[in-house]
Image (tube, helix red, strand yellow):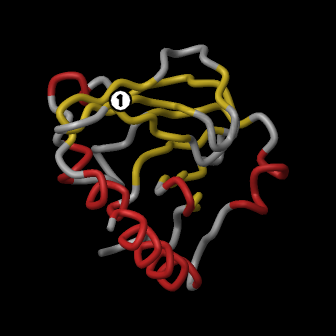
Amino acid sequence: MRFPSDLLYLVEHDVWARMHDDGTATVGITALGIKLSGEIYMCRAKPVGSEIAQGRAVAVVELAKAIVSVKSAVTGTVVEVNPRLEETPELVHRDPYGEGWLARLALRDFEADRPQLVQGDEVAEVMAQHAVQAMKDLE
């Protein structure tokens, strides 16, 4: 499983953020989060203008046996949602760090969010530990 080193990860919720120079961040679900949840049949982000706090719902996904809230890695206001997910939710599976993004947020207080996020070399190790614990929780 890959975890691009340029992204920031909120590990406990299996989500990521890609920072942009304009004060926004694109958010999505990690490859591990997708693997743990299974096939996604529907994906709907909160509408533009929604205020989202870090660790709170930014989207809802429908799985084979459940509807699950997807948390945001950062705090901000939704300024764009991925329009392609309405017709092709499988993009989240095929390209979770690219075309399968969920929403773009105008950041509110990134410095307050930063301590909870993991980036760079430590991501793989932290995600591996998280995966082990998640598998135990599923048993």
Q: Residues within 10 Å of mark 1 (few under 14, many from 20)?
A: some
Say whether residue 18 is left or right of residue 55: left
Residue at the front extreme of this rendering = 139
The residue lying at 52 percent from left, 31 percent from top is 58
The residue lying at 59 percent from left, 58 percent from top is 10
Q: Quadrant of the N terminus?
A: bottom left
Pick whichever, 15 or 8, lies toward us.
15
The residue lying at 40 percent from left, 50 percent from top is 29
Q: Does residue 93 lie above or below 77 as drawn?
A: below
Q: Which residue is mark 1?
A: 82
Q: Position of residue 135 (x, y in %)?
A: 36, 71
Say whether residue 112 is left or right of residue 79: right
Say whether residue 50 is left or right of residue 36: right
> What secondary structure is found at the residue carrying circle 1?
loop
Q: Quadrant of the C terminus?
A: bottom left
The residue lying at 35 percent from left, 63 percent from top is 138
Pick whichever, 58 or 23, lies toward us.
58
Q: Position of residue 27 (x, y in %)?
A: 49, 44
Q: What amino acid is found at the position of numbered circle 1 in the picture?
A: Asn
Q: Position of residue 85 (x, y in %)?
A: 25, 30
Pick whichever, 128 or 107, lies toward us.
128
**Residue 89, image quadrant:** top left
